Each structure stands twice: as C-alpha cells, then as structure tokens.
Amino acid sequence: MTKQAPLRILLWHVHGSWAESFVRGPHRYYLPLLPEGGQWGRGLCGRDWPNAEEVPVDRLKDLDPDVVVLQRPEEIDLVDRWLGRRPGGDLPAVFVEHNTPRPSAATTRHPLADRNDIPLAHVTHFNELMWDSGLAPTVVISHGIPDPGDHYTGEIPHGVAMINEPVRRGRITGTDLLPAFAEIAPVDVYGIGSEELDGRHRAVWAGGDLPAARLHAEVARRRVYLHTARWTSLGLSLLEAMHLGTPVVALATTEAVLAVPPDAGVISTDVQALAKAYRELIHEPDFAVLAGKAAREFALSHYGLDAFLNRWDALLTEVIA
C-alpha cells in the first residue's frame, strides 16, 4: 500500500492541550500569525511543535492547504477572506467542537447545524448527544494525550486540582466545592489564574500556571486528584492525572462518567460521598496507589495518543477524498 503524503493542515491555536496532541501527527500544521497576535493570529504561542509553523496571514494564500481544521465559527469567514477559499466548498474542512453546549444543555443549536458540508468532530460522546447538530454530519474523536509516564508518589497528603481561571469560571468548574474537600485535607490548585484563589480559603493553595513537566511532577506528588467540573467537555487535566497514576475523586458529570472507572477512585454526584472517599484516599496511601494504577491503566487503553491520531487520519482522509 502506498503511504499517503503528509497533509498541509491549517488550524488556529485555540485549545492548547488538544493541539499539543493533534500536531504530533505525521502532517504539516500551519497556524496563522498576525503582528498584533490576538485570538485570530497568535501563531504557536511559544510552543515547541516540530511539525508546526507560524504563517503570517499575508502569506496564507501561497500555502494552498489541503484541509482546514476549524474550532470557532468566525474562522470560516477568516479563511474565505484570507485565502479566497470557502471552507466546506472549495477547501475541505472539519469543525472541532471542544465545548459543552451553552446556554441550554439539550436545546442549544450548533452554529453549523444548518449546513451539511462541514462535519462536526465532537471530542466526547456527551457533546455529540447534547448539541443540536442539525444537518451537520457528526463524528466523535475522543481525546488522546502523550503519556507523561507513571510518576505518582502521593507523598504529599493533599488533594490537587488543575483548573484554568477558577475564580471567573466559578460554578462551571466547581471551584465552590473545593473548600469542602480542603476542610479534610489541603487542596493545591494549579492553572491559569489560580493565584486569584489566594486568601479565599485557608487550606486552598494556588500553585500558579506551570510548564507541563513541572506541573506533572507536582501533581504526581499529591495524594488525590480532584475533578470538580460541573459543565466542561472533559478536562484533559483529568486524563493527565490518570496517566500519571493519580487516584481520582470526580463529579459524575458530562463525559467523566465514561472516563473514570470505579476502581480508579470514586465518581459521584453526591458531594458528601466524594468527601468521604477523599478522606479515605488521603489517609490510606496504599489504597491510593492501587486506585492510581487502575486510573493509569484505563487512561492508557482508552485515551492514548496513537488511537487519537489514527482516528484523525481516517477522518481527514475521508474529508479530502
């Protein structure tokens, strides 16, 4: 069988953790760059992605991409204006839906619901179920991440959470639930804007936004990973913690009910039951180690990078055919 030549893929830096996996495929990935940066021209954002490069917007017409991977509705008009090619028309396109629907859980109509020329790639089965995708063809390509390695020690008897903008996002990310766990054992929170938590609760500590390697090292030293999100698609931070071998205490919401098996810790909508499990894992390190091993095994078999990239290759091949 003839091996397919690498594709030229145009995409934006929108969801950095997702893109970290996506650009590890065998293709060439081009990200628009504007002098002022901003959400439409931030390029690589300083990321070291060997197969990806920044392309100034005035050079995009010379790029002749094979396909565009869209992540925001506004990108359709940007591509038309910058390249003179219409996504879904004379330029093959896929739209990645990263988010749960808002404002309504089950009745929100997707922005692409009235067209059938651009498939929607939902990142979770929950998203595909809840969005009203209308005429748009849909597919689910579950997350897959690079394996950071089994680094769990759990030597620090604290909980740990990875939440970006925990104060602004508040109830969406379950930030209001953290004090209930912190009354049992301290909770260390990492992520963009986590420093805004300082002083709000004596036992909730903000660790800031760390580079991935340092972040993984710090998470692996904590005893339990807390996943308190009420309404997010599926936090990649949860999958990272599981890959590290960290046991999980998680809200049974959105896709987490499929991502966290019972022997990886505890998953429930009963906060009191979660607090009880949190206490047990904090005070029983041997139990925490066993749960963490189960979490890692499940994450490797269900959210590995190779399967993710293979599913994307299959979809892109279909779209450009």
Image (cartoon, helix red, strand yellow):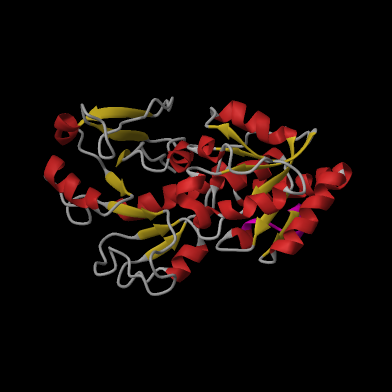
* In-front residue for pair 48/300: 48
Q: Who's the residue at 43% across and 35% down the image?
A: 26
The segment highlighted magenta reads 259-264
Q: Who's the residue at 55% across and 46% down the image?
A: 236
**Within the image, what quadrant is residue 105 found in?**
bottom left
183 relative position to 259: left or right: right
Residue 97, visible in the rendered structure? yes
* In-front residue for pair 27/134: 134
Work out whether 92 lies above or below 289.
Answer: below
Q: Does the magenta stretch include residue 225?
A: no
Q: Is the magenta stretch mostly helix, strand or loop?
A: helix
Extreme bottom residue here?
Answer: 107
* In-front residue for pair 200/276: 200
Q: Who's the residue at 42% across and 39% down the image?
A: 3
Work out whether 57 lies above or below 260.
Answer: above
Work out whether 107 lies above or below 72.
Answer: below
